[in-house]
């Protein structure tokens, strides 16, 4: 892929980059809608977002085992840094990216990361549906569900 004659990604295909951008954007939009459902106050949401951003920025450059990295990929901030870090590693090693193959022994399989990101999107939308049914807006009918989750209003 080149931008104005500058080769940005020579070994990462445009289709993988496009798929990555689409998946990460859908994850971020779903996360944003969930946070909008959870908070009425902009100030509390802003403070939580800053706290999460600082935490994920610190955790992004530490080495974790595979399970911890996949759990952290449920957050869109971490998954963006994590996916692009491995795309840049494969670009610097001058090897073409294959979604179902490890580049190095310590590197993850990109298709597994994409599956985790898809699962996070599904989890976000389940919570969005739940909070919309339990705590609807002004004109909607509230549904009584016996299991209640702590709500940050």
Image (cartoon, helix red, strand yellow):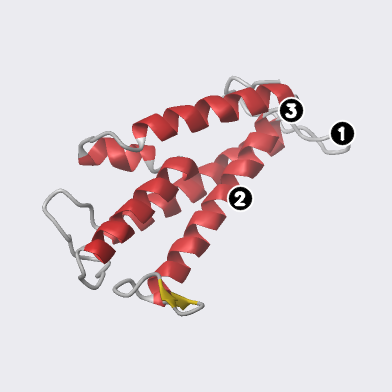
- Give the answer, above or below, for where 98 lies relative to 113: below
Foreground disc of the pair 1, 3: 3
Label 1: which secondary element: loop
Report the front residue among 77 and 139: 77
Q: On the image, numbered disc 3 is attached to which residue? A: 42
Say which quarter of the image contains residue 130: top right
Q: Secondary structure at mark 3?
A: helix
The residue lying at 72 percent from left, 23 percent from top is 43
Q: Nearer the viewer, mark 1 or mark 2?
A: 2
Q: Residue furthest front?
A: 5
Q: Residues within 10 Å of mark 3 (few under 14, many from 20)?
A: few
Report, in whole angstroms, how far the alpha carbon at label 1 lies from the one at label 3: 19 Å
Horizontal side of residue 39 vs 138, given as left or right: left
Q: Which residue is mark 1?
A: 138
**Residue 131 % position (x, y):** 66, 34
Spatial CA span between label 1 and label 2: 23 Å
**In the image, residue 23 lies at what x, y percent?**
48, 59
Q: Badges 1 and 3: C-beta atoms under 8 Å apart?
A: no
| Residue shown at the point (20%, 37%) measured from the top left | 65
Pinpoint residue 82: horizontal percent, then vertical percent.
Answer: 35, 48
- Is 25 placed above or below 49 here? below
Residue 29: give its label: 2
Ranked by sequence position, the earlier of labels 3 and 2 is 2
Q: Secondary structure at mark 2?
A: helix
> Badge 1: few (under 14), some or many (20 or more) residues near its Cα, within 10 Å?
few
């Amino acid at each position: 892929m080149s931008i104005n004659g500058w080769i940005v990604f020579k070994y990462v295909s445009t289709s993988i980059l496009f798929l990555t951008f689409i998946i990460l954007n859908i994850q971020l939009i779903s996360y944003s809608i969930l946070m909008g459902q959870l908070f009425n106050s902009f100030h509390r949401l802003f403070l939580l977002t800053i706290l999460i951003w600082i935490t994920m920025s610190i955790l992004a450059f530490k080495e974790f085992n595979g399970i911890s990295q996949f759990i952290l990929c449920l957050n869109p901030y971490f998954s963006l840094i994590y996916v692009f870090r491995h795309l840049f590693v494969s670009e610097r090693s001058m090897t073409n990216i294959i979604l179902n193959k490890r580049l190095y022994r310590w590197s993850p399989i990109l298709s597994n990361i994409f599956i985790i990101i898809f699962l996070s999107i599904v989890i976000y939308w389940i919570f969005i549906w739940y909070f919309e049914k339990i705590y609807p807006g002004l004109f909607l009918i509230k549904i009584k569900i016996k299991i209640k989750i702590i709500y940050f209003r």
